[in-house]
Image: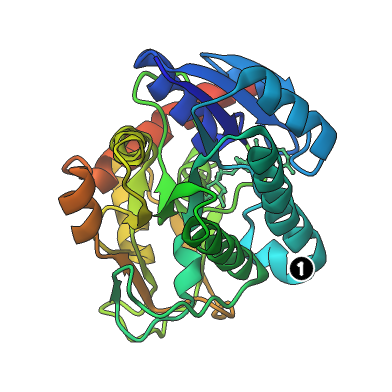
Amino acid sequence: MQKLLITGGAGYVGRHLVKFLGKKGFEIMVYDNLITGFPDSLLYGELVVGDLRDEENMSLLLKRWQPDIVIHLASWSGVGESFDEPLEYYQNNVQGSLTLLTCMKKTGVRKLIFSSSASVYGEPEKAMVDEETELSPISPYGKSKVMVEKILEDMKLAGEISYLSLRYFNVAGADEEGLLGEERENDNHLITRCVRTALMKEKKISIFGTDYPTEDGTCVRDYIHVEDLARSHLPALNFLNEGGWGIFNCGSGQGYSVKEVIEMTSRVTGVDIGQEHKERRSGDPPVLVADISSIKEKLGWKPQEGCLERIISSAWNWEQKRMSFINP
Ligand SMILES: NC(=O)c1ccc[n+]([C@@H]2O[C@H](COP(=O)([O-])OP(=O)(O)OC[C@H]3O[C@@H](n4cnc5c(N)ncnc54)[C@H](O)[C@@H]3O)[C@@H](O)[C@H]2O)c1
């Protein structure tokens, strides 16, 4: 079985990916500085604690482990936060990736899957974006992802690397077996906020902007179940092994408004979630939904049906379990 190095594997997406690929029999090494990662959540493989930007450490690890493929998730990912700390974001996300690629080149590791993001599209003209849509990221976070994609493209053209960039849309939900889920206390993603608000019944959920040109005035997004997302990495690995490369949107292909997500959360949890309306946030496009024709056609992957309800049910189950650990 192939050997994988997963950077950022102790993070939210990473630990679900480790579980899925570990179950499939891949040999896994995780490299993570645990800034937002949780070591106890790793169900497979071995963990090396270290920073992407530590060239010596990274080179030694690559030389020792000699992975067939690197899956590169390690990054900071707060869109809002990246406006406040742009330098730190470029240092971590771009410089970190450069160090990784330098070490890969030095040690002869040539295949990589990169976790990119829908934020590369910024505020697109059309609601449904395919991979050819012009890139116009707004946040330093989105720009850092575009920069890494460009570096990868140039290295591919120079014959130095083969890669796949997966542009994740809004990843949400939890492991259906209830073993894993979102652990970050300050996670700001809508579905985590919704289920956490449902748990603390007296609280209200903030809606940023209710005057967008959408059916109910709130932003429409594409939510992909974290387990569906993890599954997409298997055909991605196969595609790379067979000589394929390129960039793929990885979403559900369906859009839901903020209000629809809140309503679905109320239905799933049985809690009537209070709302408070706030000003729009800068850089929030009205609609951002993935056209997933390319990944369907070339990788043969598609998300399971009933994505939103499954996402919310799994997140709700996980959050109740998590709270029972925190407040037994
Ligand atoms: N969660 C989403 O909705 C989403 C959407 C689009 C893209 N992504 C991308 O997916 C990837 C994983 O996101 P996530 O939600 O799991 O975030 P996360 O913060 O839970 O995971 C990131 C992991 O990387 C580690 N890390 C960060 N900087 C590091 C460094 N310099 N060296 C070593 N380890 C480092 C963190 O400790 C953490 O374990 C990121 O690249 C993110 O940009 C996520």
Image coordinates for residue 99, horizontal then vertical, percent: 74, 47
Q: Residue at x 50, y 67 (%)?
A: 119
One can see residue 51 in this view: yes
**Which quadrant does the N terminus fall into?**
top left
Q: Residue furthest front?
A: 159
Taking 148 as reference, is 217 left or right?
left
Depth order, front residue of 269/46: 46
Vertical placement of residue 96 versus 121, above or below: above
Protein image colouring: rainbow
Q: Residue at x 36, y 32 (%)?
A: 314
> Quarter-wise, where is residue 200 in the image?
top right
Can you see residue 269?
no
For disc 1, the marked residue is 86
Where disc 1 sits, the SS reads helix
Depth order, front residue of 40/270: 40
Q: Position of residue 50 (x, y in %)?
A: 78, 30
Say which residue appears at 42% left-offset and 32% top-offset: 174
Residue 24 is left or right of residue 39, and the answer is: left
Picture mark count: 1
For ligand 1, give the image quadrant.
top right
- Side (left or right) of 289 relative to 4: left
* Residue 77 left/right relative to 152: right
Residue 146 vertical placement versus 203 (above, below): below
> Is disc 1 surrounded by few (<14), some (14 to 19) or many (20+) residues within 10 Å?
some
Quadrant into which the C terminus falls: top right
Amino acid at dot 1: Pro
Q: Residue 7, image x and y in percent?
A: 61, 35
Going 38% across and 50% down the picture, which residue do you hit? 272
Q: Position of residue 74 (x, y in %)?
A: 63, 42
Say if disc 1 is inside 8 Å of ligand 1: no
Q: Nearer the viewer, residue 68 or 175?
A: 68
